[in-house]
């Protein structure tokens, strides 16, 4: 699999449709290429599309079930694979099985003929690192880590470069054997629209809400697995009169329940289904109530939105939350009572919200996708 000889630079972004962060980061990179690098061809490919039914079930379909219903088991898997990486027979067997299921990947790469590859999922990075070690892949491969953490499966020192969310993640990757010169702190890619000037008045008007009224943005995640309608009902019951923008994702039943709640509260709840303009919804709010997924957190930061976390998945989401708490941009609740206490305290204390907003702004990297592409193209692998 040699590098391309095309005149126009070409980048292949490899990801998986497991969770949301990996795919959304990949989509952000391709959208950034279209906006800021019009001469660059950027192609996105989902590795899961190559796999058989059992692999798809084990890696994609079961992810939400395991993380939501069996969080302790997920924590065990996350921590165990982090410590052992590829050093055990079981891990080597897993990697072998992945390569067999995705054995058509070299043909996909050859057909795309990219000048560089960016991986937004560790499985892609792991497989391509194997090809690099064998000498069958000469195209530069870069890795975009999609959490504020450094799990061992991302560590593939043979690859050309790594893009990470923070200086801490860089330090931890160096400790795990990645050369410092290969790591850049760019942030996590978000859609170009998150870097736009989005006046609150205009965004609030699109939703039919008062821009001067305290507004909370609530998100259940793309799969809508959290009881968001119950959270909204309890926040309304606090009696603070806040407006709630509630995003149900693709969960149509949740969206219907939120619609009923909107009618019962005379419009204090604004129900939203799956949205491609999350940045505009966030721009109409004072703070967010959300799960601490890597992309959800990064999008909030890009809009300088303080966060209250709930329902964190053990592993990557817990570590995302820990970093945001340490930086002053978020609060974390362990149960409904704790969530309501934190939301009520913020509704009663606008000064604290503004202080947290300043911390979120300090961490924001809305141009991360552009910076990643600029680094890849400037590496000499493309163009």
Image (spheres, rainbow, N blue to C red):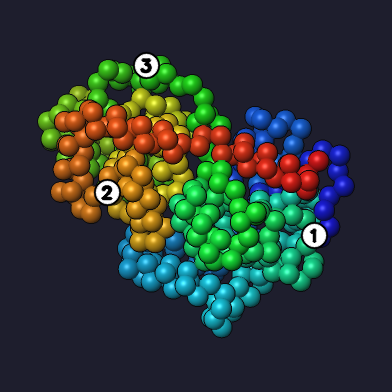
| Disc nearest the viewer among 3 and 1 | 1
Which of the marked residues, 3 or 1, is nearer the chain's N terminus? 1
Above or below, 30 relative to 147: above
Which of the marked residues, 1 or 2, is nearer the chain's N terminus? 1
User: Tag on residue 138?
Assistant: 1
Q: Nearer the viewer, residue 283 or 106?
A: 283
Is 284 situated left or right of 127 in this image?
Answer: left
Q: Quadrant of the N terminus?
A: bottom right
Is 335 situated left or right of 186 in this image?
Answer: left
| Quarter assignment of residue 281 | top left
Residue 66 visible: yes
Q: Position of residue 88 (x, y in %)?
A: 54, 81
Which of the marked residues, 2 or 3, is nearer the chain's N terminus? 3
Q: Residue furthest bottom?
A: 89
- Marks 2 and 3 sit apart, C-alpha to C-alpha, by 29 Å
Q: Secondary structure at mark 3?
A: helix
Q: Residue at x 70, y 45 (%)?
A: 376
- Marks 3 and 1 sit apart, C-alpha to C-alpha, by 51 Å
Q: Position of residue 321 (x, y in %)?
A: 35, 51
Residue 256 visible: no
User: Tag on residue 201?
Assistant: 3
The residue to which callout 2 is attached is 332
Q: Residue at x 50, y 37 (%)?
A: 365
Disc 2 residue crowd, few under 14, some 14–19, many 20+, Cα 10 Å: many
Q: Position of residue 14 (x, y in %)?
A: 64, 53
> Tags 3 and 1 in contact by the CB under 8 Å rule?
no
């Amino acid at each position: 699999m040699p590098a391309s000889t095309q005149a126009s630079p070409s980048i292949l972004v490899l990801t998986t449709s497991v969770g949301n962060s990996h795919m959304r980061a990949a989509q952000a990179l391709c959208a950034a290429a279209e906006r800021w690098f019009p001469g660059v061809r950027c192609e996105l490919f989902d590795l899961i599309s190559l796999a058989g039914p059992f692999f798809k079930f084990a890696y994609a379909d079961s992810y939400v079930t395991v993380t939501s219903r069996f969080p302790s088991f997920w924590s065990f898997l996350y921590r165990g694979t982090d410590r052992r990486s590829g050093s055990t027979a079981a891990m080597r067997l897993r990697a072998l099985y992945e390569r067999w299921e995705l054995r058509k990947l070299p043909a996909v790469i050859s057909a795309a003929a990219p000048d560089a590859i960016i991986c937004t999922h560790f499985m892609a990075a792991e497989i391509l690192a194997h090809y690099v070690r064998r000498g069958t892949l000469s195209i530069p491969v870069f890795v975009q880590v999609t959490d504020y953490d450094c799990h061992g499966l991302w560590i593939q020192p043979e690859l050309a470069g790594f893009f990470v969310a923070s200086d801490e993640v860089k330090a931890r990757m160096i400790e795990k054997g990645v050369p410092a010169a290969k790591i850049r702190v760019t942030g996590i890619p978000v859609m170009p629209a998150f870097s736009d000037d989005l006046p609150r008045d205009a965004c609030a008007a699109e939703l039919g809400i008062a821009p001067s009224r305290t507004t909370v943005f609530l998100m259940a995640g793309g799969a809508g697995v959290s009881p968001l309608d119950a959270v909204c009902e309890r926040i309304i019951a606090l009696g603070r009169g806040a407006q709630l923008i509630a995003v149900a994702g693709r969960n149509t039943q949740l969206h219907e329940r939120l619609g009923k709640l909107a009618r019962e509260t005379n419009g204090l709840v604004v129900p939203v289904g799956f949205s491609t303009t999350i940045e505009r919804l966030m721009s109409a709010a004072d703070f967010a109530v959300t799960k601490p997924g890597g992309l959800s957190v990064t999008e909030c930061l890009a809009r300088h939105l303080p966060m209250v976390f709930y329902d964190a998945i053990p592993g990557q989401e817990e570590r995302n939350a820990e970093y945001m708490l340490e930086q002053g941009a978020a609060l974390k609740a362990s149960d409904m009572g704790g969530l309501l206490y934190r939301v009520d305290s913020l509704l009663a204390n606008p000064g604290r919200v503004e202080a947290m907003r300043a911390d979120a702004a300090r961490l924001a990297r809305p141009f991360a996708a552009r910076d990643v592409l600029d680094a890849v193209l400037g590496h000499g692998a493309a163009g």
